[in-house]
Amino acid sequence: MTQKPQTKKTNPRIAEMLRVDHAGEYGAVAIYRGQQAVFRRQRATQPMAAQLAEMEAEEQKHLDAFDKLLIERNVRPTAMTPIWNVAGYGLGVVTALMGEKAAHACTEAVETVIEEHYAEQAEACATEDPELAATFLEFREDELHHRDTAIAGGSQDAPAYRTLSAVIEAGCRVAIAVTAKI
């Protein structure tokens, strides 16, 4: 009888980080897909759809990396994935229907929370897992680029910008807290 290879148990805090980040990237891909579904429909907004497709591709790269890390480190994904998929896609559609500036405001709000989150995670695991910390910092740079692109696109001129941003940022923080445990 052959024995199964022993898998090293991942530090619970790092497992939580990976679960949250995997879900976050999954949600980001869903948001961008929802926005593109709206913007691809009209010739005037197809350039916006193309820009969103580029950002989605970067988020997909992050998601693929976290898919791999979950498997390598034997970390379960969140049970909330189906809900985050629907919520992300719905948020993308709703903000796109509000217009390009609102879609940019959504990106700015989400990426603001996520870049702060990645910075905190990189600092928290820098000593124990410098390679993972470097991944967090690399992905943080992409998120900062997305946020800056959104600001340049007029995010802060969106209808009800402050309220929209506050609601989306709060939703992101709630999703992070829930995903860490479920």
Image (spheres, rainbow, N blue to C red):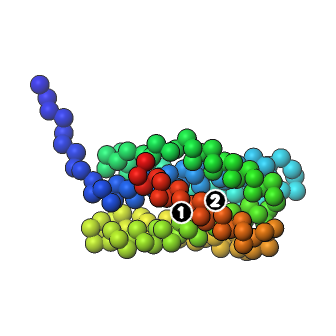
| Left or right side of 127 for 27 | right
Q: Earlier in the sequence, mark 2 or mark 1?
A: 2
The label shown at residue 12 is none
Q: Position of residue 60 (x, y in %)?
A: 55, 52
Q: Secondary structure at mark 1?
A: helix
How many numbered discs, if any?
Answer: 2
12 vs 21, nearest the viewer: 12
State the residue lying farthest toward the left: 1
Dot 1 alpha-carbon crowd within 10 angstroms: few under 14, some 14 to 19, many 20 or more? some
Residue 9 % position (x, y): 24, 50
Residue 32 in view here: yes
Residue reaching furthest top? 1
Question: Residue 93, image x and y in percent?
Answer: 74, 50
Distance from label 2 to label 1 (Cα)?
21 Å
Q: Is 42 left, or right, of 152 in this rendering?
A: right
Q: Secondary structure at mark 2?
A: helix
Label 1 amino acid?
Answer: Arg
Report the amino acid beneath label 2: Met
Residue at 40% across, 59% down: 17
Residue 134 showing in the rendered view: no
Q: Which residue is mark 1?
A: 173
Mark 2 touches mark 1? (CB < 8 Å): no
* Residue that numbered label 2 is attached to: 55
Vertical relation: 143 (above or below) 30 = below
In the displayed structure, would residue 147 be above or below residue 103? below
Q: Quadrant of residue 142?
A: bottom right
Residue at the image position 66 percent from the left and 64 percent from the top = 167
Describe residue 177's horizontal placement relative to residue 31 as left or right.
left
The quadrant the N terminus occupies is: top left
